[in-house]
Image (tube, grey):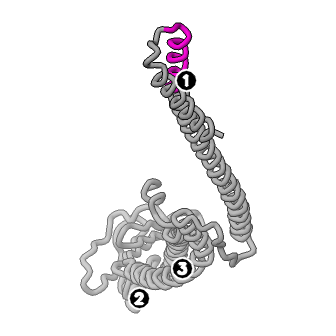
Amino acid sequence: MRAFIKRLPIRQKLLFMIMSTTIPVLVLGSVGYISLDYYRSRDALHRELSAQAQLILNSSTAALQFLDPRTAQEILRTLAPNEHVRRACLYDGAGRVFAEYIAPRSDVACPTPPGDDGYRFSADDLVIVLSLLDDRGRRLGSLYVLSDLVLLKERLNAQLAIVAIVLVLTTGVALLIASRVHSIVSDPITDLARTATDVSSGGDYSLRATRTTDDELGVLVDAFNRMLERIQLRERELSAANQDLRNENAERRRVEHERADLLVREREANRLKDEFLATLSHELRTPLNAILGWTRLLRSAAIPPTEMDRALEKVERNAQVQARLVEDLL
């Protein structure tokens, strides 16, 4: 049962709690009322029949003393207007049936002996036994009266019908009131839950729950809204921090890119410089080596006189090439 109740929505939980409290109270109150009315009616029936039986027994004193069963029979017939009396038996002092009254359509026999004085209820009837005593305490006679409980049962059935109608009406009224009450309690909770769901699904912390009551639910709504405000503020701060971090990362990447580009350029410049120096060294050494070679040959007189002009021409030509290279460099 508890697991079933836990799965119910808040509206149905409130309705279930209200009705599960109201209906048992109504049923218990109705059962108590019916029981009290039943026992009161039974006690009233007993008192009324006992008074009537006592009156008949007192009226039968003379008939018992003078042994007049006809008169006793007439006295017992005064019970005829009471249609619920099924049998009345008058006994003499020895416990023998002296006179009797039998209602129509009744087949109940007079018990012998009548039994002890008093009354007793059964499921279908009421039995009253009264004794008539003389001054010495001797029993002059006894009266046995048997009555059905039709009137009591009819009253009980009527009470049950009335109580059933009242239960239906009061249950309907209780259900109507409960539906109104649970809407007052559950609507703020439902609205709060809906707002929380929208915030959770959409991530929009600008949403706010509406406060409709001034009780603890109103306090809860205010606390929830303040929590959303703090979360929204924190979200803004985190967004600003993330933006700053993104800007810093972008700037760092730009600097790193520029540094890498600078390194590439520097390597390219070094390569070009090395190539230039290598080329320059080669271009400068080539005519210089020719000049030095022919000069050594001329100084060592290794060239015949006929080749002197051609050797000097080569020295001059390489010197001119060297001069042009120097001029181009400058």
The magenta region covers: 285-301
Choose between 206 and 314: the one closer to the eye: 314
Residue assigned mark 2: 82
Q: What element carries label 1?
A: helix
Give, as a three-letter code, the residue at label 2.
Asn
Quadrant for the N terminus in the image: bottom left
Q: Is residue 300 magenta?
A: yes
Which one is earlier in the sequence, the residue at label 1 or at label 2?
2
Q: Quadrant of residue 114?
A: bottom left
Q: Identify the residue at horizontal 43%, vertical 79% (top origin).
A: 160
Q: Identify the residue at horizontal 37%, vertical 78% (top origin).
A: 148
| Position in image of residue 173 (x %, y %) | 53, 84
| Position in image of residue 73 (x %, y %) | 37, 85
Choose between 85 and 24: the one closer to the eye: 24
Which one is earlier in the sequence, the residue at label 3 or at label 1?
3
Q: Is residue 299 magenta?
A: yes
Residue assigned mark 1: 288
